[in-house]
Image (cartoon, coloured by chain):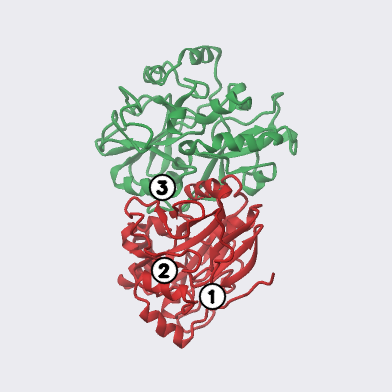
Chain colours: A red, B green
Amino acid sequence: MSITTTRLTRSKEATELTLRLTTGELARQAARANEYTNSTSGVAPTYLQANLLVLPSRYAADFRNLCARNPVPCPLIAESAAPGDFSRLVSHLPSVSSKSLAEGLDLRTDCPRYNVYKDSKLVHAGVPDVTDQWTEDHVAFLVGCSQSFESALERAGLPVRHSVQDRTVPMYRSNIPLNAAGVFSGSTYTVSMRPFPAKDIERVREISRAYHATHGEPVAWGWDAVARLGVENIDEVQWGQAPLTEDGQPLSTVFGDEENVPVFWGCGVSTQEAVMKAPLEGAILAHFPGCMLIMDCGEDDVL
Amino acid sequence: MSITTTRLTRSKEATELTLRLTTGELARQAARANEYTNSTSGVAPTYLQANLLVLPSRYAADFRNLCARNPVPCPLIAESAAPGDFSRLVSHLPSVSSKSLAEGLDLRTDCPRYNVYKDSKLVHAGVPDVTDQWTEDHVAFLVGCSQSFESALERAGLPVRHSVQDRTVPMYRSNIPLNAAGVFSGSTYTVSMRPFPAKDIERVREISRAYHATHGEPVAWGWDAVARLGVENIDEVQWGQAPLTEDGQPLSTVFGDEENVPVFWGCGVSTQEAVMKAPLEGAILAHFPGCMLIMDCGEDDVL
């Protein structure tokens, strides 16, 4: 099977459509109809966004434990009500009822794009749906997404660079080990990155801190964090799009600049990285990084 | 102030006393009377053991968040019912009631030994009690201890080396970053180590996995994990006592031996390491590593 590589540069039409997708339900419907196949950054502002990971049921207990042991990169929000069920979820958040997560959901179609893994290897990247891959034995898990605190940062007067530039958040592999859980061992955190002025970092930490279910406060910040996290080149992302300066230059061109300090958060793509490092058998389905599932509940409902 | 350094080599008398301390209550009474001032490994078998950290109340919220973001090294079990309260605890474990934690407790005296920090620096190590340091503003936290799953390993026919040799568990600083939480940033996991035969590692993982509230399964294993964790010398511990082979030789003398594979767990001393890395003001009190608080409830009550 060939691997589709998909770049998420949003066209003028996609940007116009984004503005019309004002709720989680509208966003899911547009994704289901394959009218919307792009990054969900800026889609349905203030609605909760989630990472999706779908596993054969025999890996479900280990995956729950992986999330419990790594709540910063992998905060578990919800899972399938039963194996094979692609429409009903059980909430893991005390403040959110299962019913309020997503009405009329179809997990096989409602992300704008998907990744498909076979035997722990990525075989399809960015496909529009996974209906033909879904089986009676699949269990879906939703994990918090850091795009969920971007509205709060913007409301506080802290613009989020990739959102302003209509790009996908930059994501990297890091060297921080994920705490092992059963079959999931030997993997590391993936991290998302947003540059902020050095003087604002304590406010950025404080605002995102409250969002426990969507990664909470950053795991590292500062230009020296790039090497410390094992990120080889800040301009070369593993997922999403490369970060730019306000003027549209590669971020590395302003290395050391106090107005462009990289700030890193735990990232739910860690779940897909854990899949690739584990010896899993069978089909594993996931959202395409940046193209999240959008829920009916609000970002602030999970506080 | 001078720093007392304390070696926890158990005398014949201490070993005899250990055998008489069969419950958490007896162990706390002996610690309170300063009859017992040694490692609690092997004391009151099957009773839950805990790390203690006592902070000025203004750091309590950040510390709760540190534990929530790092449940493997810092699984939060309980905290003071109110600032200044050294006798009543509120349980954070759904399966353990607050009342069943410890009847007639005095957190100022009931660990065999204590550490005292002032302004994030260790100023007294291994003192018998901290009554003179306790204030109305202090909040105590109890964090799970890996000595709590040693009985389960032994019951499964997997002898725990340091316990067989009547020594304190070896503990090391590692390079795994603790997820930052407010004032607590820039610190790393401390880890405890027990050698097991390579062929038994999957069983060791499986048995300890269930003990979520007391660190769960290991974070790393194998001789290659020593360098990966940034442990410079397996014979030089930062807390506890150096690990030995079955014949009483330094563990490094059998480097690569499949019968003596180092297995590392998250360790509650991470909380004291986090204190030393943070810019805290005032007196912080803690147990002396290895000399834990022993509870009334059982290790298996937290499963």
In the rendering, which numbered label is found on residue B205? Answer: none
Left or right of B38 on screen, residue B283: left
Residue at image mark 1: A241
Marks 1 and 3 sit apart, C-alpha to C-alpha, by 31 Å
Local crowd size for mark 3, using a 10 Å CA cut-off: few (<14), some (14–19), many (≥20): many
Q: Position of residue B211 (x, y in %)?
A: 50, 35
Q: Kindly identify which chain the residue marked by label 2 belongs to.
A: A
Image quadrant holding the N terminus of chain A, namely bottom right
Q: Position of residue B140 (x, y in %)?
A: 33, 36
Left or right of B173 on screen, residue B128: left
Q: Quadrant of residue B117?
A: top left
SS label for mark 3:
helix
Image quadrant holding the C terminus of chain A, namely bottom left
In the rendering, which numbered label is found on residue A198? Answer: 2
In percent of the image, x 70 and y 25: which residue is there?
Answer: B246
- Are circles 1 and 3 on residues that touch, CB within 8 Å? no
Marks 2 and 3 sit apart, C-alpha to C-alpha, by 26 Å
Q: Earlier in the sequence, mark 2 or mark 1?
A: 2
Residue at image mark 3: B68
